[in-house]
Amino acid sequence: MNESSYRIFFDTVPHGDGPPRPEVSPAPGPEPSTPSVTRDSLLEAVSPILETEPEVGESVQRSFDRKERELRAFFDQLDHDGRAAAYLRLANGQSNDPFVAKLARLSAERRQRIIASLGEAPRRRMK
């Protein structure tokens, strides 16, 4: 083919500027720092106690009794500050607190006994 044969297509293909150029946005700034996640040691210690399944042949009543005993034993092992923090969190009972929500699975009577034992623990240790 020669150059004159290409001229046939010259008028059929529209000529223009082409597609518009994409908008260039400024470079993004640095990523915001990730929020620091604080570990809740009370929640981490209480969760395995409350999430255990009843042992083989153990009734539901005995299972909850065992869990209550284990929770009291755990709270008795805490130092004064740990007991005070647990007592305040349970006594205030804020609904957005995961520690309180986890212990909400217990009956109100059991929770009250645990709160009472947390309040009595410093007096028992002094004797």
Image: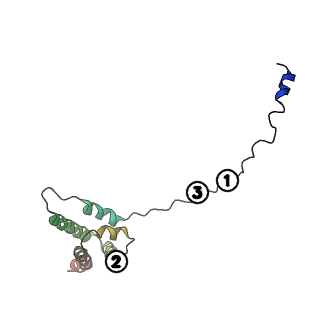
Give the amino acid type for the residue marked by disc 2 in the picture.
Answer: Leu
Q: On the rendered image, what quadrant is the C terminus found in?
A: bottom left
Q: Which mark is residue 59?
A: none
Q: Is 25 or 91 nearer to us in this picture?
A: 25
Task: Please provide percent x and percent y for residue 126.
Answer: 23, 80
**Residue in view at x 18 percent, y 65 percent:** 66
Residue ranking furthest to the top: 1
Vertical placement of 54 versus 22: above or below? below
Task: Please provide percent x and percent y for residue 76.
Answer: 24, 71
- Left or right of 33 in this view: 105: left
Residue beneath disc 2: 88
How many labels sit on residues? 3
Task: Please provide percent x and percent y for residue 73.
Answer: 22, 68
Q: CA distance from mark 3 to mark 1?
A: 12 Å
Q: Is 127 or 69 nearer to us in this picture?
A: 69
Q: CA distance from mark 2 to mark 1?
A: 48 Å
Q: Which mark is residue 31?
A: 3
**Residue in view at x 84 percent, y 31 percent:** 10
Element class at badge 1? loop
Residue beneath disc 1: 27
Q: Is 125 or 100 nearer to us in this picture?
A: 100
Other-residue count near label 2 (Cα within 10 Å), few / some / many at <14 / 14–19 / ≥20: some
Vertical placement of 43 versus 89: above or below? above
